[in-house]
Image (cartoon, coloured by chain):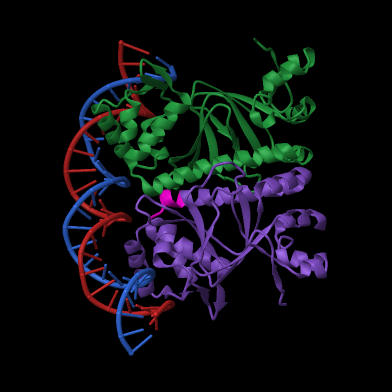
Chain colours: A purple, B green, C red, D blue
Amino acid sequence: MYIEKTSLSGGFFVSKSLYLSGMFDELKYWYLRDHKLFRTLSMSQIRQLCIITGFKKAQKGDVIYFGTSEMPRIYLLKKGSIKIVSLDDEGNEIVKDVIQKGDLFGHLELDEGDEGNEYAKALTPEVSICSFLQSDFEQLMLKHPDLALSYTKFVGLKMKRLRNNYNNLISKDAKSRLVSFFTEWAEREGTEIEGRIHFENYLTQNDIAQIICTSRQTAVQLLTELENKGLIYYSRKEIIIENLQKLKEI
Amino acid sequence: MYIEKTSLSGGFFVSKSLYLSGMFDELKYWYLRDHKLFRTLSMSQIRQLCIITGFKKAQKGDVIYFGTSEMPRIYLLKKGSIKIVSLDDEGNEIVKDVIQKGDLFGHLELDEGDEGNEYAKALTPEVSICSFLQSDFEQLMLKHPDLALSYTKFVGLKMKRLRNNYNNLISKDAKSRLVSFFTEWAEREGTEIEGRIHFENYLTQNDIAQIICTSRQTAVQLLTELENKGLIYYSRKEIIIENLQKLKEI
DNA sequence: AGGGAAATGTCAAGAAGCCGACATTCGCAC
DNA sequence: GTGCGAATGTCGGCTTCTTGACATTTCCCT
């Protein structure tokens, strides 16, 4: 369905159908209703968030700032994948996180801390993001305790993942980390074709290296090793896991 | 103030003064009111938690199980310090976390996941812990959205610390990690005497090594190095930071 | 007091991974 | 197409840290 867009103040775009065809299209447009966090909310509650919501589209490589001096926001990635990066002393990009479609990011901790020089970068050709103010979200949580509880569990889940990464970093070597990263990636986005698992590769080797916390050279070495053993196929466009079982056994 | 204790069903102890001198002593006893998370609660709300609250005392080296098949609980460390450990394949203790007085621990993520073979161990001569059921806490949050909000921010803060550790592990070497661990420890528990910062050492070198994610041997080497440079004094009982400024400059 | 376990120190060999350097390939803009 | 910059491969030396082995000290229990 094509939705004509109208420019509003603030540089964001909202659906024209918002004014024409009522709430249903509005919800479809903002995608909040789709997220399980917001299922318990009434339409009017969602609209309360939506009113002050921003919407953005971006293309591959585009930079989406969000750690700036503006009001802290929470973002929902509706389509595509992005990476959160910050700059080190030499000005190199440090990959902090990779966000998938449907995931929240931004000021999830609801604190005042400025993640100063952090910004997001689009990884896929088309990316759409919608966002709302942290303060508005807090107000809504105060009115909706079950939302607050769901959100707390959601943040808890995030923390669990982080802790898992931390434990991997401590106890496993680079090869194991690469393997678990690939298997998780495959489970998340892969499609099985004749026993093989295919998924699009929107990351550079540098990104992959940083995610598994090693140098690019080591990552390449491991990639070619896995490829030589016939466990994976790797290219810029696509990754294929030839034998998931054997890969996990390493 | 000495409080006589009475054994109740469940093996826990509650203050006899609970029945005698009213709520004020009750609150003092359970220490929940002291925690900033619970400041916004009414006394009856706190009592609702307290009713199903457990209380435990332990001595140095004592093991406090909490990852077992029981109902998931949230714990508040009222006095002393403890470490959260799990066992690896060879049965060695892996230090997961060190909990300070006033801190919460346990099933903070409010999920169902069992941290299977995890347990807590007392680090200081006297440790007191009180706890409540996760489910009761959730019920209370549903009635008190502002509590839920505070708790979310609290979990967020925990996550931020973990992320900080993660970043240190990625970008810094063992020496820097040891130094920042010591400076943080000093800020948290140290007392300044004539320009030096003293604090009690309730950790073994093995514990310290695991916290900064290195081997014991490396940790010892770094400790003696720092000591030879006159930056710190290290013993089993006490640690003294001779020159905080120079230590940070490393 | 004394015996044993745990904790602390020390050393050296070896592994894992980092880093710089370089060649090659790919993709995009002109 | 052509050129340029980014991304991809590859190599080898070098640093950091791990690992095992051992001696010594301290603490705690009886």
Q: Quadrant of residue B198?
A: top left
Inspect this view and state whether residue A242 appears: no
- Residue A235: x and y in percent read 42, 75
B51 up-or-down from B92: above or below:
above
Q: Quadrant of the C terminus of chain B?
A: top left
Q: Is residue A169 magenta?
A: yes
Q: How many marks?
A: 0
Q: Which residues are magenta?
A: A167-173
- Residue B108: x and y in percent read 62, 41
Q: Quadrant of the N terminus of chain B?
A: top right
Q: What residue is at 33 percent from the left and 62 percent from the top?
A: A218
Q: What residue is at 50 percent from the left and 20 percent from the top?
A: B125
B65 up-or-down from A25: above or below:
above
- Residue B202: x and y in percent read 43, 25
Q: What residue is at 66 percent from the left and 44 percent from the top?
A: B110
Position of D10 with respect to B170 (left or right) is: left
Most frequent secondary structure within the magenta stretch: helix
Front-lying residue, A210 or B99: A210
- Residue A240: x and y in percent read 47, 75
Q: Is residue A78 magenta?
A: no
Q: Quadrant of residue A227?
A: bottom left
Position of D16 with respect to B1 (left or right) is: left
Front-lying residue, A11 or B160: A11
Inspect this view and state whether residue A211 appears: yes
Q: Quadrant of residue B74?
A: top right
A84 up-or-down from B172: above or below:
below
Q: What residue is at 70 percent from the left and 69 percent from the top?
A: A6
Front-lying residue, A192 or B177: B177
